[in-house]
Amino acid sequence: MSDQKTPKKQGRGIKEVFRKYMVALKRSPQSIPLTVLLIAFLLYSLNLSSIANTTARINGANMGQCEFVAMLFSILAFVVFLRAFPKRRKANKVMLGLLGGMLALLVFVDTVYISRIVNATTRAENTIVIDDNSRYISTAQTVVTLHVIFIAATALLLITLPLYSKAIRKIKTSIEVEGNENMAAIEFEDDDQ
């Protein structure tokens, strides 16, 4: 006998993993916007050297402050997000409002940062040319643009959370057990013996 699973058993394993994932998603649908927020944070923080080099090269007004605020509020947004959705309780409206303000601030500072890059690379005098030595500028512009998109997607997912959480809860995740169709026919023995 070989220890390898048959394709039918492997298919059941994949279905069971998907079922468990759906059960977890039904319990906490807010994990969807949290995942998008995590992707935005990782994208920004893993490309921070390109952003810092761009800030140093262009040295536009408030670019350093925008970079600092974006990093700080990306981290704080996680803390506030987790406090906004405590386990087994209703969402904390104050924390949700604070989270919304932080997401709006992140979009604002990223937009300011992008405008400084565009201004520096398109102005008539003292234009910064993106060549092989300064490719990090285009990388930073792309990363910050994607950061804005992911933050906006997080906000949109938070706003529509009541709608899609109802749809997710309607997904059937119960397991059909063989032999349980007629539970009324089961007879119990007397314990008189």
Image: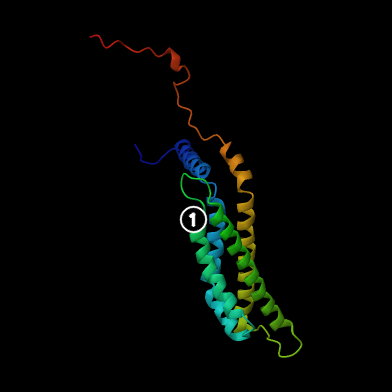
Q: Position of residue 71 (x, y in %)?
A: 53, 71
Q: Quadrant of residue 125?
A: bottom right
Q: What is the three-letter code of the residue carrying label 1? A: Leu
Q: Residue furthest front?
A: 94
Residue at 55 percent of width and 59 percent of height: 37
Question: In the picture provided, is 118 more to the left or to the right than 157?
Answer: right
Residue at 48 percent of width and 44 percent of height: 24
Q: Check disc 1: other Cα within 10 Å, few if <14, some if 14-19, many if 20+.
A: some
Q: Quadrant of residue 152?
A: bottom right
Query: Compared to 99, does 90 lie above or below?
Result: above
Q: Residue furthest bottom?
A: 126
Q: Quadrant of residue 63?
A: bottom right
Question: In the picture provided, is 134 more to the left or to the right than 9?
Answer: right
Q: Quadrant of the N terminus?
A: top left
Q: Which residue is mark 1?
A: 82
Query: Compared to 8, does 79 lie above or below?
Result: below
Q: Position of residue 66 (x, y in %)?
A: 59, 75
Query: Which type of secondary structure does the marked residue at label 1 adopt?
Result: helix
Q: Residue furthest right?
A: 124
Q: Is residue 81 visible?
A: yes
Q: Is residue 42 visible?
A: no
Residue at 68 percent of width and 86 percent of height: 128
Q: Position of residue 31 (x, y in %)?
A: 52, 51
Q: Quadrant of the C terminus?
A: top left
Q: Position of residue 122 (x, y in %)?
A: 74, 82
Viewer-nearest residue: 27 or 127: 27
